[in-house]
Structures are given as C-alpha cells and as structure tokens.
Amino acid sequence: MHVFLTCWDAVVSGIGDHHWLTIVTGLGAVATAAGVAAGACLAMRYGRRASVSVSAKAYPTLTGIVIATRPVVKAVGIFRVKFHGPKGAVVKVTEIYINDSRELQDGLSRDRDAVFGTQFVEAGEELTTTSVFPPTSPSPRVIGWRVSIAIAAPSRLLASGGWWADQIFVPRPEASEPVN
C-alpha cells in the first residue's frame, strides 16, 4: 500500500495542484451523459421505422372483376409499431378511367380497414396478408385500379406519429376466359 501511495503522490505532484485530472474526468462524464441522451433521442425518433409495400392483381370472374391485394408491413426499427385503431392499416382500391378530355381520372373507390387483424408489428417482424375485394363491373372507360396501402402509427412522444404508404397500378385484365 505504501508503494501505491508513493506512486500516487508522484502523479499528483507531476500534474500539480490544478486538479487537472479531476477536470478531465468531469469532462469525460459530461461527454458520456450527452452521448447517452443523444442516443436515447435518436432511438425514440428513429426506433419506430417501418416499410410497406403492396402488390395486387385483377381477375375476371363470371360476376365481374375481383381484385386481390397483398399488403406487407415490416417494422425495421427497434420498437414495435402499433397502428392507429382500425384506420391504422388501410388498403384502398380506386378505379382509374379516361374522361371525355382524354385525361386520367379517379373513379369509385373501396377501402378495407384493419387489414392485418392484429394492430401492431413487432420490431424486425414482417406481416403479410391477402385482402380480396368483391366482384365489380366497371365501366368500359376504366383502364385499371390504383391499389394503395396506408399505415399510421402514433408516436410515443408528443402528438406526432409515423405514416408509411405504397401504391401500384393494376391494369384491367384483357378479355379472356373468366375464372369460375
């Protein structure tokens, strides 16, 4: 123990009476605390990320055209992504037709709420489902459908939240043998 105290006295006398070691240690502690706080802020801000995608196909049947959609949502952050109630995961199918001015225009649309049943996706988990829209008999001007998925999730902080979306165009199937 006497050897340690002698060495410590040599270090302190080498540094001097300015408490330099105490100041450097204090600065290190402040930098560590700032790093932990910044990391926590980044985790709360970017820890609830998701990616969404949708694919779809139109099938002619004896009673009209059926649209089958395949929405996918994946939580890519470190926290669970919980959807806003039944409107938190919505698939929408909108007719696209050519109007009298030869411009594209939206027509009738149909929504399917709470498409994933469970209203959350765990971190790293990917949810996939199929949502089939009943047969429709669109006008001859309808050239296809815009199929979209919208995910809305509340934030753990403040009154903000996260929103993710994807959409695709599904062309009208060519006249062929309908599926029974």
Image (cartoon, helix red, strand yellow):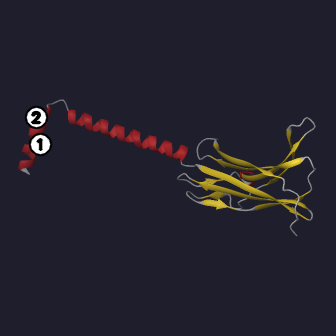
Q: Position of residue 16 (x, y in %)?
A: 14, 31
- Three-letter amino acid code of the residue under disc 1: Trp
In this rendered view, identify the residue nearer to me: 162 or 59.
59
**Res. 177 image quadrant:** bottom right
Instruction: Name the kind of residue labelled 2 in the image.
Output: Ser
Q: CA distance from mark 1 to mark 2?
A: 8 Å
Q: Dot 1: what SS?
A: helix
In the image: residue 126, left or right of residue 171? left
Residue displayed at 70% across by 48% down:
166
Task: Label 2, secondary structure: give it.
Answer: helix
Closer to the chain start, of discs 1 and 2, is 1
- As rendered, which of 36 and 165 lies closer to the eye? 165
Horizontal and vertical percent position of residue 76 = 56, 53
List x then y, in percent, for residue 29.
32, 40
Circle 2 is placed at which residue position? 13
Above or below, comparing residue 108 to residue 60 in the picture: above
Name the residue nearer the viewer: 18 or 49.
Answer: 49
Quadrant in the picture for residue 35: top left
Where is residue 33 shown, x and y percent of the image?
38, 41
Nearest the viewer among 73 and 140 is 140
Determine which residue is flagged by label 1.
8
